[in-house]
Image (cartoon, rainbow, N blue to C red):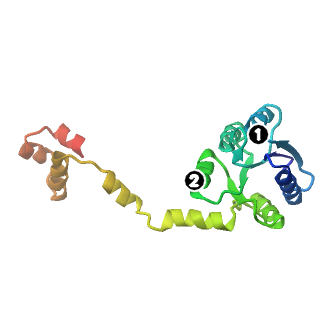
Amino acid sequence: MKHALILEDMPESQEMLREVAQSAYPGIRVCFAADVADALQMLTQLQFDLALIDLSLPDGDGTTVVEAMRSQFPDCMIVVATIFDDDEHLFPALRAGAHGYLLKDQPPEHLAKQLRGISEGHPPLSPSVARRLLEHFHVGQKSDSDKIAENAMLTPREREVLVQLAKGIRIANIGTVMNISRHTVGDHV
């Protein structure tokens, strides 16, 4: 990692994140942006290998920068660094293209360790964030087949065709029995 962008509006958090990035990747050059507009401007001037992005900024949401970086620098490791430990911030950030989500209230050594894990293929996720992701996909979630079954809106005629098929009746015979063409039977299937 050669160049890092830190998008953070609080000076003390900027400094902490700089120390974390340089501890994880000694020699990395760090650029700072304090708002979305500055960050987007920097993307036109430099290429970044690492980005630490805050979400709540004076002129908007950091996910705007996540999306821009993801499309402009597909190889850049984009990590949200925030105080927000809730689904309302986590999932939009991941959908925007963030590779990781770290909480700034963790000890700097832990954050640096999480960032170093990137080069070994470990996604940088704070423990509570990892738990939240697991809960989202496991607790009370229906299987894909359950969701498909619930969302399948079959007409009574389509259901009738499927019942006939389940009984082993051939498509041509179903068409004859139901007084529809075999092509219509095929469309229902």
Q: From the top left corner, tell me how far across and down residue 115 is, in percent.
A: 78, 59
C-alpha gap between disc 1 and disc 2: 21 Å
Q: From the top left corner, tell me how far across and down residue 5 is, in percent.
A: 81, 45
View extreme (right): residue:
27
User: Would you identify the image quadrant in which residue 126 lies?
Assistant: bottom right
For label 2, the residue is 88
- Left-right relation of 11 to 169: right
The mark found on residue 73 in the picture is: none
Q: Report the residue at 11% width, 39% height from top.
A: 180
- Left-right relation of 71 to 186: right
Q: Report the residue at 83% width, 63% height from top.
A: 108
User: Would you identify the image quadrant in which residue 150 lies?
Assistant: bottom left
Three-letter amino acid code at the position of disc 1: Asp
Three-letter amino acid code at the position of disc 2: Glu
The mark found on residue 35 in the picture is: 1
Q: Residues within 10 Å of mark 2 (few under 14, many from 20)?
A: few
Q: Circle 1 — which element?
A: loop
Q: How many marks?
A: 2
Q: Report the residue at 71% width, 57% height from top.
A: 83
Q: Earlier in the sequence, mark 1 or mark 2?
A: 1
